[in-house]
Every structure is written in structure tokens, then in C-alpha cells.
Amino acid sequence: AGGHKTTSSRRTSVERALDRNWTGLQVGPRPAPELRDEERHDRQAGGIWFEGGLGGPPATVDLGRELEGMAGRQLRMRMFTMEPGAVFGPIHDHRGRPGLVYVLQGVITDHRDGVATDYGPGVGWPEDRNTTHWLENRGSTTAIEISVDIVGQEGSHG
């Protein structure tokens, strides 16, 4: 209820680049009830944006060069910023894309299995094959999270 708002349309070159590649992130009081694939889950939209290494693309490590049996997989780190009232949705899963989230600033509410859990600075949550959720910033201050996950590399089938 009240308190949800769309933030300014301030756009950076990183955000414009994301628009060319990713779709489906929604901002509003509730996410759409259907599941989306990974690319659709990770788009910049009003109130939410991400930064990778030095404000550019996500920071990644080719795991195939580091660990036997990990060909076609990479370790990815991103920083997401959520303005007050922002919703990170639609509901999505993490099958084949396990990860960890750490909250740097503000409070992020994680909705899964009908339960809303608030995570504040210095804590976070795991995202594994059993995770199906959506996130929101119900607070009055900007929230920032670091997300680290293992994903398939572009062009691979791993």
C-alpha cells in the first residue's frame, strides 16, 4: 500500500546497454506471478539498477579455467541498488544459478514460500535450486546489495 513510487528516469550508459539485452524486471507493488528465465530476471528498470566491475558490466571469473568440471560456467558479482518502493521481480527461481546475497545498506525484503523476511546491512541470504522468490525495498532509504552467483557463459550450454 502507499509508499511505493517510481523513481527518476536518470539513466547511465550502463543502464542503456542493459535495456538492449535484458527484459522483464518490473517495478510496482507486486511482481507478476509467472516465472521468467534468467535474462528476463536481470534487467534494469525504474528504481533498480546494477553495477559490475567499475560501474561497467558484471565482474566475472571463468570457472572453466579455474576448476575442473566447470567448463562453460562463470562466477559473477553484481551490485544492485534499490530505491525506496522498488520491486525486483517478477517472481523467479535460481535453478542452475546458485548464489549468495549480502546487503550493504538499507533493508531488502525477500518474499518466498509466502513468508516476507527483512534483511538489513551486514546480513544476506543464499539462493539455491530450491529458491523461488521476489524482492522489494519497503523502507524509506535506498538499499544496496551485492549478488554473487554461478551462471552459464554466453554461448555455452553448461
Image (cartoon, rainbow, N blue to C red):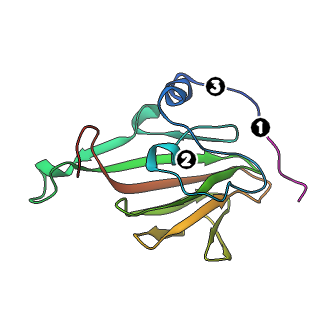
Circle 3 sits in a helix, a strand or a loop, which is it? Answer: loop
Magenta highlight on residue 4: yes
Residue in the picture at 60% in, 57% down: 34
Q: CA distance from mark 3 to mark 1?
A: 11 Å
- Residue shown at 44% from the left, 74% from the top: 130
- Where, quadrant-wise, is the N terminus in this rendering? bottom right
Q: Looking at the magenta stretch, what is its main secondary structure?
A: loop
Give the x, y percent position of residue 5. 82, 45
Instruction: Name the disc covering residue 80, or none.
Output: 2
Mark 1 or mark 2: whose residue is earlier in sequence: 1
Residue 138, percent across and down? 76, 60
Above or below, 157 against 98 in this view is above
CB under 8 Å between callouts 3 and 1? no
- Amino acid under label 3? Arg
Q: Which residue is mark 3?
A: 11
Magenta residues, as a range? Answer: 1-6
Could you say which is closer to the camera, residue 91 or residue 6?
Answer: 91
Does residue 130 sit above or below 61 in this rendering? Answer: below
Asked which quadrant contains residue 128, the reply is bottom left
In primary-sequence order, the first of circles 2 and 3 is 3
